[in-house]
Image (tube, rainbow, N blue to C red):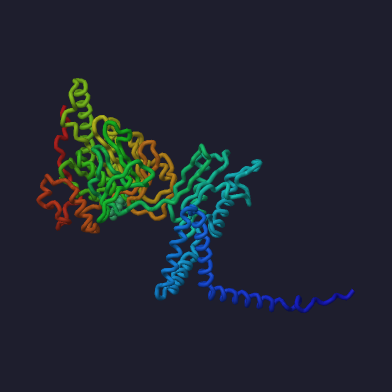
């Protein structure tokens, strides 16, 4: 049978139909644009009329008469006024236009792009949160993401800032490796370059991922509002600690959450170990601790790297020594070990006799040791004892004797740190760009936040004992004798230093800025009473 040709309109009319549709659409768009004011006013009039009807219905019957009278009086007044009817018309039109204007609809859920992002995240999580024989899987390919994501927030760029995930009870959330896998995946899928915190609620099978803002880098060294025995290591997230301290930040004063380390007889973390990448700010941290320690105690500084970055402390009141050579360091640490024993014996005797602690052991003693690994290497080459051996007594008995030890070193020297350091330095800090494994190797626990891509100097993590891992930004405490230090910061740090008490004072008047010629970058100050008195 011969095929009948299609009607012309069906075989060749597609193009003309499309053209006609486009024409009709353009005409409708133009008409809508032209008639928009009319449409707005009509919508407004309808809304005003609706509001009027509602108001009339809500007016009690006994008040309707006076209300009607008032309206009639107004109408009459406008009618009698010159141009009254015109004014009334314009007023009603303006009110209708205002009432009928387009309002931005209130957002009630994710838009298309956000939904696509959530769906993609859901699909990526399916292999981790599902097993083959689960009869009602929460996570399945093409499944309902809304059941699994119980809360989400986006920023202006449609990037996730908060996501709450419900996961199946059989997921091994108590295993660090399983959690780390999920955290890595969420980090990658939600956009790198930002820091995320993961809060696992193992009882409720919930995971909350939150994007963290940068920690403030503009806060410098200053007198922090703390009690004796408290040292501000730096600043952290508001919800990570219980308190805030007021600080000067530029021209303003604001409250910021500090990481406060408590030392002294009741401290459970009496000594601190800080490990960093080169240039990450460990020297600055030690300088910041020294300035705070000097308010209530005496300090000994052993600068293993010998770069002279503690020269500003030389000869100041309360600074017993700033040592950089091996011989001086060994002598100073030997004295510190004996001094710890002396304090211990004196405290013991006083307690046994029922007396208060004698005055000469009340002032805390701080031993600040930068780069002990380097000194240990020098000592080994010279056939002399490792300075760390001399730290055993202060580390073991320092808490009872009022002696605090702070050590800072770099990652490449981590294996040179002996058992006493590892056991007794229970307050830990890690600075610089580090992998999770590196952070864990120092703090004993992984951070619940992803590593930051952009790590300013002084940025890292702190952990006090078995407490949580906290993000940390150390207050800027530059070397005032460094030519690159800005004048304002130089004056601030010089202002925090105690008065000089040695001959160096004559050469460098306090607050004089960088002296010319520069003071000795390293100096040895005689330690009074190095001999042990019994
Ligand atoms: N908390 C901080 N805020 C601002 N700048 C800092 C901070 N910490 C360190 N810096 C700056 O970073 C640079 C390196 O700091 P620092 O010397 O303390 O690091 P480091 O870890 O001791 O390095 P290295 O041992 O390799 O010399 C210095 O210019 C210092 O001023």
Q: Residue at x 41, y 75 (%)?
A: 83
Q: Residue extending furthest top?
A: 353
Q: Is residue 335 above or below residue 56?
A: above
Residue 210 shows in the view: yes
| Residue 3: percent from left, percent from top | 85, 75
Give the quadrant of the N terminus: bottom right
Is 420 in front, or is 123?
123
| Residue 466: percent from left, percent from top | 39, 36
Q: Residue at x 19, y 21 (%)?
A: 354
Residue 374 shows in the view: no
Is 45 in front, or is 375?
45
Q: Is residue 167 above or below residue 155?
A: above
Is 146 in front, or is 233?
146
Q: Residue at x 66, y 77 (%)?
A: 20
Please give left or right for residue 413 compared with residue 220 in the image. Answer: right
Please give left or right for residue 93 compared with residue 279 in the image. Answer: right
Quadrant of residue 323 in the image? top left
Quadrant of residue 448 in the image? top left
| Residue 422: percent from left, percent from top | 35, 36
Please give left or right for residue 340 compared with residue 52 in the image. Answer: left
Q: How many marks?
A: 0
């Amino acid at each position: 049978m011969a095929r009948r040709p299609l009607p012309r309109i069906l075989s060749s009319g597609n193009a003309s139909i499309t053209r006609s549709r486009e024409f009709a659409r353009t005409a409708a768009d133009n008409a809508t644009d032209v008639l928009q004011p009319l449409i707005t006013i009509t919508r407004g009039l309808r809304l005003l009329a609706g509001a009027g009807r509602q108001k009339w219905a809500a007016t009690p019957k006994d008040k309707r008469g006076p209300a009607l009278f008032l309206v009639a009086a107004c109408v009459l007044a406008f009618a009698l006024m010159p141009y009254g009817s015109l004014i009334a018309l314009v007023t009603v039109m303006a009110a209708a236009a205002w009432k009928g204007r387009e309002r931005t609809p209130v957002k009630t859920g994710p838009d298309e792009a956000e939904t696509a992002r959530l769906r993609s995240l859901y699909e990526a999580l399916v292999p981790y949160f599902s097993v083959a024989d689960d009869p009602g899987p929460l996570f399945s390919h093409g499944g309902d993401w809304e059941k699994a994501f119980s809360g989400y927030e986006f920023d202006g760029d449609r990037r996730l800032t908060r996501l709450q995930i419900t996961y199946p009870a059989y997921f091994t959330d108590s295993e660090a490796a399983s959690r780390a896998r999920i955290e890595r995946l969420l980090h990658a899928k939600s956009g790198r370059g930002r820091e995320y915190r993961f809060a696992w609620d193992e009882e409720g099978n919930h995971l909350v991922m939150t994007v963290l803002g940068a920690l403030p880098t503009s806060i410098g060294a200053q007198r922090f509002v703390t009690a004796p025995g408290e040292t501000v290591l730096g600043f952290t997230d508001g919800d990570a600690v219980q308190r805030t301290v007021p600080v000067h930040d530029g021209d303003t004063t604001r409250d910021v959450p500090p990481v406060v380390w408590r030392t002294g007889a009741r401290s459970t973390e009496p000594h601190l170990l800080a490990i960093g990448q080169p240039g990450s700010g460990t020297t600055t941290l030690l300088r910041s601790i020294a300035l705070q320690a000097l308010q209530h105690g005496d300090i000994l500084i052993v600068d293993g790297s010998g770069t002279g970055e503690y020269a500003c402390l030389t000869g100041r009141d309360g600074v017993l020594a700033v040592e950089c050579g091996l011989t001086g360091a060994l002598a100073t640490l030997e004295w510190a070990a004996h001094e710890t024993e002396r304090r211990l014996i004196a405290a013991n005797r006083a307690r046994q006799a029922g007396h208060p602690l004698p005055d000469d052991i009340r002032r805390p003693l701080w031993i600040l040791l930068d780069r002990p690994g380097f000194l240990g290497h020098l000592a080994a080459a010279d056939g002399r004892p490792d300075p760390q051996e001399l730290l055993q007594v202060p580390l073991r008995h320092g808490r009872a004797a009022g002696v605090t030890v702070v050590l800072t070193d770099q990652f490449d020297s981590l294996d040179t740190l002996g058992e006493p350091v590892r056991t007794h330095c229970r307050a830990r800090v890690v600075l610089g760009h580090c992998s999770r494994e590196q952070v864990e190797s120092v703090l004993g626990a992984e951070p619940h936040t992803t590593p930051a891509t952009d790590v300013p100097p002084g940025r890292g993590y702190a952990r006090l004992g078995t407490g949580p891992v906290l993000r940390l930004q150390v207050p800027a405490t530059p070397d005032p004798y460094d030519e690159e230090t800005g004048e304002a910061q130089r004056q601030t740090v010089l202002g925090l230093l105690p008065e000089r008490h040695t001959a160096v004072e004559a050469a460098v008047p306090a607050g004089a800025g960088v002296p010319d010629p520069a003071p000795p970058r390293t100096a040895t100050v005689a330690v009074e009473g190095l001999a042990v008195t019994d």
